[in-house]
């Protein structure tokens, strides 16, 4: 039986776990409909739900159903996971490392002696999930919880005395790769500096010590309370996810409570800001911005921003949320439609204590029409004439299956909308076209293949291999060999372009149909299946067992190369502030590797190597004189410098000086740009914040698209460009 047909006929939905389809997204987002389709293209965010715990006693112990779940998950993993993993001592060792990391990733609580004591379980966890009692898992957590209480109790004691911010000392805020503390005295010193840093951050925001002490007292007390509320299901879920993540980042286990929350979120309507969130080292961090949501439309909130406080209404008091449980923060962000929520954020890439920003967003549903493709025209003056470059922005790959099932011929779909937009743009006489897939995290597989068919003749678009090694392929669904647009084509991508975006970009590149511009894409090329464990075991007490998301397949390009891990490398690279060492599949320890299968038969166009060389040469020569491009490079350099730092000063004078110096540097850089463009300078930091910056990446892509249109028009590459002696050096420079 054909693999896809088999998947469709099972009761288990084949979800290629789009970031937009996970429960975190929904919790902070808005409306979601039940998933009633077989193929949903993989996104870039793993399910990382917060616990939904009730207050419990100090005693944590495995429940009878945990043993059943462990055995069932182990069976699924060994039979169905793409890796064909064997649950043995080697895997057990990785599980222990993952569990310890899940408990104390930044090494702020546990002692070296605690970790050494856990070593006795290194080669026993595989037996526990199969048959042995699970008590050691809970014992390890109890040790961790005790350490958390000790640290936070110590932190509360420190608040009795105002710190001395005149002392010149540094705080190491990133401890992930540092050795474990060996004594309580060593941890005391680490936490003395942490509390001082927390206080300094608030002091830099012009707060008095009395207010600072009150805020931090509430923060630390709240953290203790949250720890006391952890229940047995929460501990088991944490461990099972450590187990699943040893196989790959996208396999997950959800407890019965979180499974129910996931179901509710999929079926009911909520109003929010349209962002997926997760907790990272006490901060609620933005992972993804959902196309069409309030945050996406506003444009101020960005991935990796840290939410430090939340307020209600334009005049609402900001409530400090550092150290809060994720679900509690989500409840603050979520609310009635057309109401305002304020977010205080620490911008991505900035050091602790940097100036925070306050954003006001109006809650609303994420409506399909707001996710829909949009178009614009960018005019470019070159060679004595105006060139019109059409741009079609595709926030996600969508298809309204409900309307389609109801027989509505006007159902929304990416392909239908883009086809219509192409016609409208061609009626206006465009000379070239940009497909903008930046921040597009995926969507429906059928739309990825159908959209490719607008630009290529009949042929395969993507290959899929299941855990048994069987390979299937998806072709352009249009049986007639025709295209909707055959003019100069470019595709703009970035690190957040994932799954469907990668499949489309890869097809355009492999068929030599267009030029890919931007940043290496995310590299999410795996397929997940969602298993409701209750379907396989019925307990007499009717207690649920939760659900398992398991990676069961991989995507491959028509060339046989996987998109997994490596993503799609652009033909022309543009610099980006998105840190590829932090964002992307390749940075995840357990990510499935890049590999190849056999090339499937397809008919590619003529080589674009010479054309691309010319485009790169022109771009680099032009960008040297472009004030906006130089502004971009300098800004990226500053961000990278900040990222490289692992420490911050605890001196008020130094921190204030650094903050003011950074602001002044931004102001100076902006005024250099404005002077080069013939614009009036700005004099204040407030004026700087009010400036609406151009979309530099899109402007660069438009200039490249114009060059491509010119080359197509003259039908020959200028000899002087093709033979540019500086080209090799320039190309090497842009790589760096």
Image: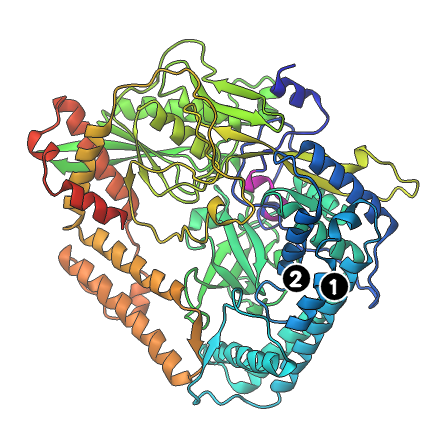
The answer to whether 121 appears left or right of 447 in the picture is right
Tag 1 secondary structure:
helix
Location of residue 734 in the rendering, given as x and y in whole percent from the top left corner: 24, 47
Disc 1 residue crowd, few under 14, some 14–19, many 20+, Cα 10 Å: some
Between the residue at mark 1 and the residue at mark 2, the CA separation in whole angstroms equals: 9 Å
**Residue toward you, 337 or 386:** 386
**Residue 416 visible, this angle:** no
Question: In the image, which residues are magenta?
Answer: 18-24
Q: Quadrant of the N terminus?
A: top right
Instruction: Identify the residue under disc 2.
Output: 103
- Residue 140 has which mark? 1
Instruction: Place residue 35 in its image quadrant.
Output: top right
Is 182 drawn above or below residue 566 in the view shown? below
Count the numbered circles shown. Answer: 2
Residue 388: percent from left, percent from top: 21, 31
- Residue pictured at 56% horizontal, 53% vertical: 277
Q: Residue at x 19, y 34 (%)?
A: 613
198 vs 158: above or below: above
State the predominant SS element of the stretch in magenta.
helix
Q: Which mark is residue 152?
A: none
* Residue 255 shows in the view: yes
Task: State the SS at label 2.
Answer: helix
Along the horizontal axis of the image, is 4 left or right of 494?
right
């Amino acid at each position: 039986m054909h693999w896809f047909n088999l998947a469709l006929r099972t009761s288990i939905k084949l979800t290629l776990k789009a970031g937009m389809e996970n429960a975190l997204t929904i919790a902070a987002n808005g409306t979601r409909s039940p998933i009633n389709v077989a193929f949903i293209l993989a996104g870039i965010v793993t399910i990382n739900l917060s616990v939904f715990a009730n207050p419990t006693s100090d005693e944590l112990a495995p429940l009878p159903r945990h043993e059943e779940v462990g055995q069932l998950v182990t069976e699924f993993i060994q039979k169905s996971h793409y890796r064909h993993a064997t649950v043995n001592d080697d895997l057990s060792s990785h599980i222990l490392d993952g569990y310890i990391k899940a408990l104390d990733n930044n090494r702020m609580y546990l002692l070296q002696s605690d970790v050494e004591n856990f070593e006795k379980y290194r080669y026993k966890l595989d037996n526990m999930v199969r048959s042995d009692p699970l008590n050691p898992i809970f014992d390890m957590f109890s040790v961790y919880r005790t350490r958390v209480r000790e640290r936070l109790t110590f932190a509360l004691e420190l608040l009795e005395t105002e710190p001395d911010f005149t002392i010149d000392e540094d705080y190491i805020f990133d401890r992930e790769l540092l050795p474990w503390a060996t004594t309580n005295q060593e941890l005391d010193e680490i936490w003395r500096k942490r509390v001082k840093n927390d206080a300094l951050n608030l002091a830099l925001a012009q707060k008095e010590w009395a207010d600072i002490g009150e805020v931090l007292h509430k923060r630390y007390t709240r953290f203790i309370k949250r720890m006391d509320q952890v229940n047995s299901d929460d501990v088991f879920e944490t461990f099972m996810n450590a187990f699943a993540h040893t196989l790959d980042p996208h396999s997950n286990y959800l407890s019965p409570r979180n499974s129910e929350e996931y179901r509710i979120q999929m079926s009911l309507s909520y109003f929010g800001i349209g962002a997926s969130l997760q907790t990272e080292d006490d901060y609620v961090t933005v992972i993804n911005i959902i196309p069409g949501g309030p945050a996406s439309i506003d444009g101020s909130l960005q991935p990796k921003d840290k939410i430090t406080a939340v307020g209600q209404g334009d005049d609402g008091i900001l409530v400090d949320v550092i150290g809060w449980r994720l679900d509690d923060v989500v409840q603050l962000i979520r609310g009635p439609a057309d109401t305002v929520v304020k977010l205080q954020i620490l911008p991505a890439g900035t050091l602790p204590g940097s100036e925070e920003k306050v954003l006001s967003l109006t809650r609303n549903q994420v409506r399909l029409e707001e996710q829909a493709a949009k178009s614009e025209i960018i005019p470019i003056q070159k060679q004595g004439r105006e060139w019109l470059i059409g741009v079609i922005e595709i926030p996600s790959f969508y298809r309204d299956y409900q309307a389609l099932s109801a027989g509505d011929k006007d159902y929304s779909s990416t392909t239908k909308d883009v086809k219509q937009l192409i016609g409208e743009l061609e009626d206006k006489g465009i000379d070239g076209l940009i497909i903008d897939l930046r921040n597009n995290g995926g969507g429906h597989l059928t739309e990825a293949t159908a959209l490719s068919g607008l630009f290529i003749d009949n042929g395969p678009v993507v290959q899929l291999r299941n855990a048994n090694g069987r390979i299937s392929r998806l072709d352009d669904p249009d049986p007639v060999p025709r295209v909707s647009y055959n003019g100069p084509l470019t595709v703009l991508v970035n690190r957040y372009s994932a799954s469907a975006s990668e499949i489309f970009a890869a097809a355009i590149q492999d068929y030599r149909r267009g030029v890919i511009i931007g940043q290496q894409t995310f590299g999410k090329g795996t397929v997940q299946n969602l298993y409701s464990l209750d379907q396989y075991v019925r307990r007499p007490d009717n207690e649920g067992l939760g659900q398992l998301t398991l990676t069961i397949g991989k995507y491959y390009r028509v060339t046989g190369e996987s998109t997994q891990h490596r993503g799609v490398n652009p033909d022309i690279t543009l610099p980006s502030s998105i840190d590829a060492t932090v964002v992307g599949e390749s940075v995840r320890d357990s990510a499935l590797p890049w590999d190849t299968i056999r090339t499937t038969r397809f008919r590619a166009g003529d080589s674009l190597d010479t054309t691309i060389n010319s485009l790169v040469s022109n771009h680099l020569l032009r960008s040297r004189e472009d004030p906006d491009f130089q502004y971009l490079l300098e800004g990226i350099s500053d961000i990278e410098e900040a990222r490289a730092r692992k420490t911050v000063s605890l001196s008020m004078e130094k921190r204030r000086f650094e903050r003011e110096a950074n602001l002044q540097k931004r102001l100076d850089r902006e005024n250099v740009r404005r002077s080069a463009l013939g614009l009036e300078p700005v004099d204040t930091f407030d004026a700087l914040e009010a400036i609406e910056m151009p979309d530099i990446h899109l402007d660069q892509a438009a200039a490249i698209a114009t060059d491509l249109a010119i080359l197509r028009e003259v039908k020959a590459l200028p000899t002087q460009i093709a033979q540019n002696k500086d080209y090799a050096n320039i190309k090497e420079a842009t790589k760096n």
